Structure formats: structure tokens, C-alpha cells
Amino acid sequence: MHEVIIQQIMITNMKTTNRIITTAIACLIFAGNMFAGGLMTNTNQSAHFLRNPARGASMEIDAVYTNPAGLSHLSREGFHFTLNNQSAFQTRTITTTTDRFAINDGNPTNVYTGEASAWAIPSFYAAYKTGRWVFSGGFGVVGGGGTLTFDHGLPEFEWTLAILPLMVNGMYPHFSPTPLNTTRYSVDMFLRGTSIIYGTQLGATFAINDMFSVFAGGRMAFVRNSHEGHLRDIKINPTFAGNPTGQMMLASDFFTQLAQTPGMPVEFQNMLLGQAESVADQQLINSQSGNGFTPILGLNFNHNRLNVGVKYEFRTNLSITNDTEIDVQNMFPDGATIPNDIPAKLTIGAQYDVIPSVTLSAGWVRFFDSDARMANDRQDLLDGGVNEFLLGAEWRINNRFLMSAGTQITRSPATDEYQTEMSHFLNSVSFGIGGAVNVNENIRINAGYFFTVFEDWTRRHYAEVGGPINVPFRTDVFGRTSRVFGIGVDFRF
């Protein structure tokens, strides 16, 4: 029975290790946006948003994105522009608790940190108002927006590799004539992924009367992803004839040497050589691209001191195509396509002038994530879609200076089954603050700072290896921090 169990462990470990590097990097594709917004959508499109995220009823130039039907209430006819840049930084941590990880030489703390940064997130929006019509367009990074790096890999790597000492020790006496006394392992793991979705938008707004205006338009989305990673130098410290002092050695060399033991049955030799192959160095270099179109409709209502904006963005039917340079396991065939829809989105916002110098704003955003296609039908693991609730306030101190602040509460539809090391979505509360300066009647400078407090997500599970053997209980805690700085300039003439 013991021999059968060890064989089962080896077979399971071979299959899992063969896919570990490509499976983990595959998750980079579905990691979603890094900053404010839903699973796939960035909503921070300008410094206006950073200083007050409740922009769903905006009647300024940023309404090209946030409330295009409200453009009919731009302050005057003619051209209006806004140029913006944002710098965003995010840290993701995964803390894993399990006895299996205590023997890893390479990462003894069991804390895995991913750093994401984007110094330049540009956006440009413009509108031309003439009579009842406003024609608008713009460009921005509507999804993704940065590079995420895990210098020490992910817990999922450890989950497979950490069983090596247990498995090797269990080979005695059926695979080895002497005890192997393996107590440690180490591995060089690395992951980096970049995901950007550019959006180019065009549309027209028409004022039906003083109270109602409508918008129709669309956005072309262009996806550009790149992924690279490796898993190499997997080492263990068995004591046997080929390594009598128990020094760290390549696991692939160990299994190969053990397979050459005189008198080793052919079946066991093949199994050991297969295991040697499964722990050999692996690498992936892959890029992806694709594009899709998003129809957009909008409605705005304005009466006295109240303005209400509604916008609906249809689902973007989008697939991305692999351009693969290196893929040892052929899990990303060159030229193959993967579904990667951007979900539909409904935005409802309102703002009210309490007094001439103070405006309060509120909003709700619903992302229809579970209706968007994802690879391997991961959308079926969501409990609906992301919901955002927004509040904000703006104080026009005088004709030159303005201050504003706001908050965004984001609630996730993710389930335990959906959450993975590279692709997880957390509940959060965000805060934005900033202001604006009117340089003259034609130029205004906006600046804002936006930071997010995330709720940790704890995922508990058992894993089963080799049929009747249950490996120890494992707990993963996902954490995250995020901050964004932005500055923009509005022009009108």
C-alpha cells in the first residue's frame, strides 16, 4: 500500500508541476484593472475623478467619459479640452499559512509580494459645443494600466513543490535502498505581467430642451498584454550515494541519478525520469493583443440646482490572440484566441448645489461582470457584478480656487472559487481629495490624490495529493494597497 501511495504522489506531482508556471502566468491575463473601477474597467480617467470620484453627473469637460449627455451644459460654446496624467502604484501581498512551507530556503516568511506601478497613465478628452449639439471624443487607459511583478513567485508554486521532501523521503525503501533524509528545498520563481486596454471614444450629445439631453457614441478598445516568468533551479537536499553529505542539489539531477540505481525496475525508472522532467527549468514569454467596440448611450436631466446623469456602456465583445515566443508546455499556442470581454456598465449620478458655492454629489455604478466572457468560463464563479457607491463634495472658494473630496465604496461579487493568487478582487473604500486653480478664464489646473483601503480576503482550503493522502490545511490571505496621483489642465476657447 505504501508503494502505491508514493506512486500516486509522484504521478500527481508530475502533472501539477508540469503546468505550474504557465497556469500561474495565465492568471496575469485575468488580473483585471489595477486601479479604480471594476474587474476589467478603469474609471479614474482624469484628475477631476481623483479629487472627487462622484462624477456621474458632471457637467464639465471630464463628462466626455463620466456623463457624456451632460456635455450640453458646458459653460459656453466652442472648444473644450482636458489633458491629464496619473501615476498609480499598487502592492499586493499573499500570506500563506501551512506547515509545508517551513522548509523553503528561498522564501522563509511565506509572504509573497507583487509590485505594480504606472508612472504615466495619460488621457485626453475634447468637446465642441455648437447650439444644441456637442461633439466629443477622447483617449484614455480604460483597463489595466501597469506592470505587476512577483519576484518570488506565488504560493501556488510552493503548494506543488513543497511536497518534494515528503515525496522523496517516502521513496525509501521501495525506490531507494537507504533513507533519503530530505528536509529542505529551494526554487527560483519569477512572474511579471503588463496589461493595458486603450480606449478611443467618439460621440454626439443633443439637447432636447433645457431639461433633457441625450448622447450616443462608442469606444474602440485595444488590448495589449505581455507576460514573462520562469521556474528554475528547483533544489532539494537528499542524502544518498550521489550526495552523501546531503547538500542542496538540483531535483532533476537527483531523480535522474536515482533512476540509474542498479536493479531499478523499468516502471520505476520511467516514473523517476518523468519526475526529473517535471522539475526541470520552465519559462514562458508571451504577448497578447485584441480589440473590440463598446456602444455607449447617455441621458441627462437638469432642473434648477439638480443635475442627474445616466450612462450605459454595452458589453465589449473582445478576444485576445496569443503571440508566444517561449512556452515549454504549449499552454498558450501561438495564434490561439482567448475570450476577454469588457463587461457592460451602468452609471447613475446626481449633483445638487446646496448653495451657489457648494455642490454635493452621489452616484452608483454597476458592472455586469458575470455576463462577460472570460477564459475557462470564470465568469460563472462570480456572484453577479461589482457595485460602487460614491459620495463627493465641491467648494468653490472664490473665482480662482476650488476644493473637493469624495469617497468610493466598492463591493466585490467574487467567490472563494473565483479568487486566485494573481486574479482576485477585494472589497474596498477609496478616498479622493484635491482642488483646482483657474489660471484665467480659459485655463484651469486640476490636481488630486486618490488612495484605497482594501479588505483582506481569507481563503481556506485543503488539497488532496495521491488519493488517500490529505496534505496539511492551507490558508491564503490576500491584501492590497493602492494610491494614485494626478494632474490635468482644462482649456476652453
Image: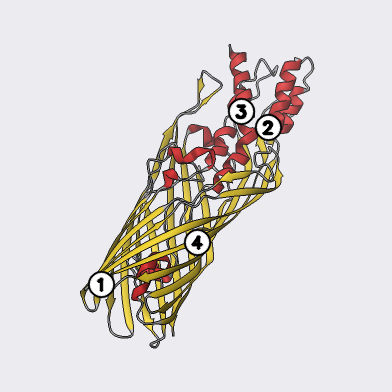
Q: Nearer the viewer, mark 4 or mark 2?
A: 4
Q: Is residue 100 left or right of residue 172?
A: left
Amino acid carrying mark 2 in the image: Ser
Residue where numbered disc 4 is placed: 219
Look at 37% across and 67% down and name the residue there. 69
Q: Earlier in the sequence, mark 4 or mark 1?
A: 4
Residue 491: tell me if it is visible: yes
Residue where numbered disc 1 is placed: 359
Q: Is residue 434 above or below residue 151?
A: below
Q: Nearer the viewer, residue 170 or 242?
A: 170
Look at 48% across and 61% down and name the residue there. 218
Locate residue 167, reporting x and y percent.
61, 25
Residue 241: tell me if it is visible: no
Q: Residue 307's image quarter?
A: bottom left
Q: Is residue 444 left or right of residue 256?
A: left
Locate residue 238, reporting x and y percent.
67, 29
Q: Is residue 409 above or below residue 241?
A: below
Are dots 2 and 3 in contact, CB under 8 Å? yes
Are dots 1 and 2 in contact, CB under 8 Å? no
Mark 1, residues whose alpha carbon is within 10 Å: few (<14), some, or many (≥20)? Answer: some
Amino acid carrying mark 4 in the image: Arg
Q: Earlier in the sequence, mark 1 or mark 2?
A: 2
Q: Nearer the viewer, mark 1 or mark 2?
A: 1
Circle 1: element type: strand
Residue where numbered disc 3 is placed: 13
Mark 4, residues whose alpha carbon is within 10 Å: few (<14), some, or many (≥20)? Answer: many
Residue where numbered disc 2 is placed: 278
Look at 24% across and 78% down and name the residue there. 357
Q: Earlier in the sequence, mark 4 or mark 2?
A: 4
Q: Nearer the viewer, residue 144 or 126?
A: 126
Q: Nearer the viewer, mark 3 or mark 1?
A: 1
